[in-house]
Structures are given as C-alpha cells and as structure tokens.
Amino acid sequence: MTADALTMDKIVSLARRRGFVFPSSEIYGGLGSAYDYGHYGVLAKNNVKARWLEAMTQERDDIVALDSAIILNPRVWEASGHVAGFTDPLVDCRTCKLRFRADDLASAQCGRKPSKHPGETEECDLTEPRRFNLMFETHLGPMHETADKVYLRPETAQGIFVNFKNVLQLARRTPPFGIAQIGKSFRNEITPGNFLFRTREFEQMEMEYFVPPDEADRWYAYWIEERLGWYTRYGIRPGHLRVREHDADELSHYSKATSDIEYLFPIGWSELEGIANRGDFDLTQHSEHSGTKLEYVGPDGERYTPHVIEPAGGVDRALLAFLVDAYDEEVVAERERVVLRLHPRIAPVKAAVLPLIAKDEQMVSRARSLYEDLRRRHVVEYDDGGAIGRRYRRQDEIGTPFAFTIDEQTLEDDTVTVRDRDSLAQKRISIDSARAWMDDALERPWNTPKAG
Ligand code: ATP
C-alpha cells in the first residue's frame, strides 16, 4: 500500500481491533495520549527492544548494557541543563482557548472554523510565548512540604553519563566504547498526539558512544549509517527513510551536530530517531557538578574527556513505524485482506498451527503436539476457532509470517502445509522437519515485496 493512501486511523483501528494497543484507562474516559499495550503489542514491542539490544550488545563487543533508575538525584538534571533549559515555548489562544508550541505553529490547527494555523486569522489572540519545562516533578518522601523535589527522567541518557566511571572501571572498556539503555522516559509534552508518535510516557532506546575527541566526526557518520541499516534490516522500506541534518539554530544546547532519521509517517516526514554529536558537554558538566572526574586515562598516562555520539530512538515510535510500513490491503480471490507484512523477527507471533477441521480429533491431536513442540522455541499460536479462511485472515492482520495446517493428508503421510503470509504460497513439508524449517526461516534474510 502506498504511503499517501494510508491514514493513521487505519493503524489505530487495527491496533485496537487486534489487541495491540488500547487507549489507556478507557473505562474512565481515557487519559489524553496515553496508551496500554495488549498481548500482541507487548510481544511486538519486546521484539523491537530485543532486536535493538542484540544489534547494540550481542552482535558487537564494544557496547555494554545498563538499566539505571528512573528517579535520579535531582542535581543530575541541574548539571545536564534540563532544569534550566528543557523547555518548549508555549502560547495560549485567548479566543479558542487552545495551547500550542510556539515553535511549531505551522503544523498546528486553530480551534475555530475555518481551521487555519494559529495566528493566521484576525480572530486569533495569541499570548506571548512562555517557556514551559517538560519535566514531570514529584516528591521523595511522605511529607509533601518538606520532601525533596525530584523528577521523572525525561531521557535515559543522563543515567548513562553518571555511570560512565563504573563502566569504564568495572567493564574494563577503553574508548571507543558504548553504553546502551532501554527504559521509560516522561515528558509533559504540550502537544502530544498522533497515536504512539508523541505521548507523555514512552520508552527510549539510547546508546552513548564514548570516543577519542579527534574521532568524533567519523563515529557520528558511522552511527547514522548503522542506525539506518538497522531499520531497513528489519523491513522498513529504504524509500520511506531519510536523514535530515539540523541547522545550526535548531541544535540543542549540548549538541555539536545532530541528524534525524526521519520516516514517512501518515502525518508526513517526521523524526524517528536522532543521532547527536554531544561533544564533551555531558561528561564535563557532570565532572564539574559532582566533583568526580569523568575522563579516560590511558596506560601511558594520556588523559582526555571522551566525546559522545548518541543514537537516541523511541521504542513506541519505532513500533509505530514498523506497523505503518507493514500495513497493506489487497484483494485476493475477490476478497479484501488486511495484512501486516512485518519482518518475522518483529512479528508478535511467528507461526500459527491450525487443524483444518476442528472437530477431527486426530487432526487436533497432531496439531496440538506440533504446537507444543514449536512453542518450546518460538512464540506460536494454536487456533481451531472458525473457518480456516477466517483463521488465516486473523493471523494476516497480526502479521504472523507462517501457518502450519494439519489436514487429511497429514494423517496419511505425516506432512503439513506451510502457508506464507506474503506470497500466500503453500507447500508441504514433513511434520518432523517443521521445527528445523522454522528455525531456518527465522534466520534467513527476509524480503517481502512492498509497494512504493
Ligand atoms: P521531538 O522533536 O519529536 O520532540 P526530540 O528531538 O525531543 O523529539 P529526543 O530527545 O532526541 O527527541 O528523543 C529521542 C527519541 O525519543 C525520538 O527520536 C523519538 O523516537 C523518541 N521520543 C521523544 N519524545 C517522544 C514522545 N513524546 N513520545 C514518543 N517518543 C518520543
């Protein structure tokens, strides 16, 4: 399906219909831009995180993992510049009573008809921009008045910087080396929206790569390519990705250079992940504020503050991109089907095991034993509910790449059919080889025809 024909509503509706993502606290009327993940959403999101962690840590030997606390000593956020500077400029409209990000009026809609961008009609009465800090505050301790004010982290990166020395010493790393972390972040966004694209609570996948200062430019270019390659490896169409370098006036206070990997979402080209050259800003700031020197000292006494290259992506935003890119509608044998052409290693369920006739005890028993064998290694689903066509369609909509069907012939010659989600081709293999066949299918480089 081409990008311009796909709306976010179709993704939201499929996600809900098939139990990937629900609006949060729905029975109480929901909570703006908060979502709960259902079974398939959890499985798919875990796959996104697992593939990232694999690429960052398992497939290379220069990056280690970390899981730092969400609530850190508040001085961390003073040193990082977030207390003073993690703000968005906010304007209110006195006429329509809506609130906008002053730096993004061009993509906002005024609340009155005919809808225009805020400030474009004479009726708009915008306040002067005010700086609004995006960090959520809370209190540590039982007595609100005397308790310490702390913050829910707005990014995972600072938890990495404050552990730099631990990793340097205990993981015995020398630059270039990286620390990777996945975890929840919280931002009191002024204009959340567009489903999972921008929420106030979300998960990030961030990696801080510490390098000798004179190698920073090279590693910055390297990580842009590396991250682009990760998205295409897991099935995103290269034509739906682009790199956009920030102009000097767009750069964050810490950044020497930043490039966004953008994806062609139904809302248009938007940031999927940012790769920043943070220079020595963070380690220098934390050295000064904490009094602990965060530097590298080599065996022959050379010392320097490493520079940092940071690929920072969002788990939920990445999952949204995978769903959008995979969504397809087509007509097969005069019937329309919706299919998620997810990469098998991102797909929540790897295979379905289906007895052709649910009332046939022998078929059911063969199907159950194949299912129990396969699930020892893979997430697979057994389904005997309803006509076979309907069961296939259900699996297509959740993106299950393979289906094994047990039929009359299975009972005669111990073979099963394997149906391919994308080509719809069916072939017979021996039931005993099904597990090895799946192991192999999930290892193979994957290529599905996608339009556009
Ligand atoms: P944006 O410009 O979209 O607000 P950002 O440049 O502030 O994003 P970063 O601080 O670079 O974002 O965060 C890294 C990644 O975290 C983003 O590329 C995105 O994938 C994800 N992310 C950031 N904010 C949100 C959010 N509110 N909801 C979901 N994901 C987010």
Image (spheres, rainbow, N blue to C red):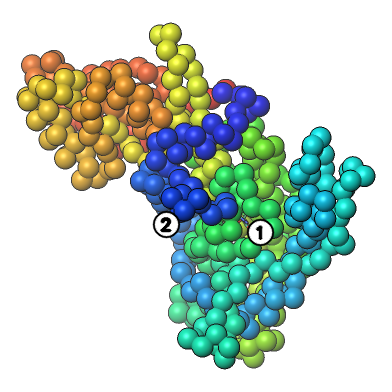
Q: To which quarter of the image does residue 145 belong?
A: bottom right
**What residue is drawn where x is 48% and y is 86%?**
142
Label 1 neighbour load within 10 Å: few <14, some 14-19, many 20+? many
Name the image quarter holding the C terminus.
Answer: top right
Q: In the image, which is nearer the foreground, mark 1 or mark 2?
A: 1
Q: Can residue 364 be seen? A: yes
Label 1 to label 2, Cα distance in Å? 34 Å
The residue singled out by tag 1 in the image is 189
The residue singled out by tag 2 in the image is 58
Tell me: 26 left or right of 104: left
The residue at the far right in this view is 122
Label 2 neighbour load within 10 Å: few <14, some 14-19, many 20+? some
Q: Amino acid at mark 1?
A: Glu
> Any atom of ligand 1 within 8 Å of the CB at mark 1?
yes
Q: To which quarter of the image does residue 263 belong?
A: top right
Q: Position of residue 99 (x, y in %)?
A: 75, 55
Camera-nearest residue between 269 and 109 = 109
In this rendering, is residue 13 above or below 86?
above
Tell me: 4 left or right of 40: right
Name the image quarter holding the N terminus.
Answer: top right
Image marks 1 and 2: residues in contact by CB distance under 8 Å: no
Q: Which mark is residue 161?
A: none
Q: Secondary structure at mark 2?
A: helix
Q: Position of residue 50 (x, y in %)?
A: 42, 52
The residue at the far front in this view is 95
- Sequence-wise first label, 1 or 2: 2
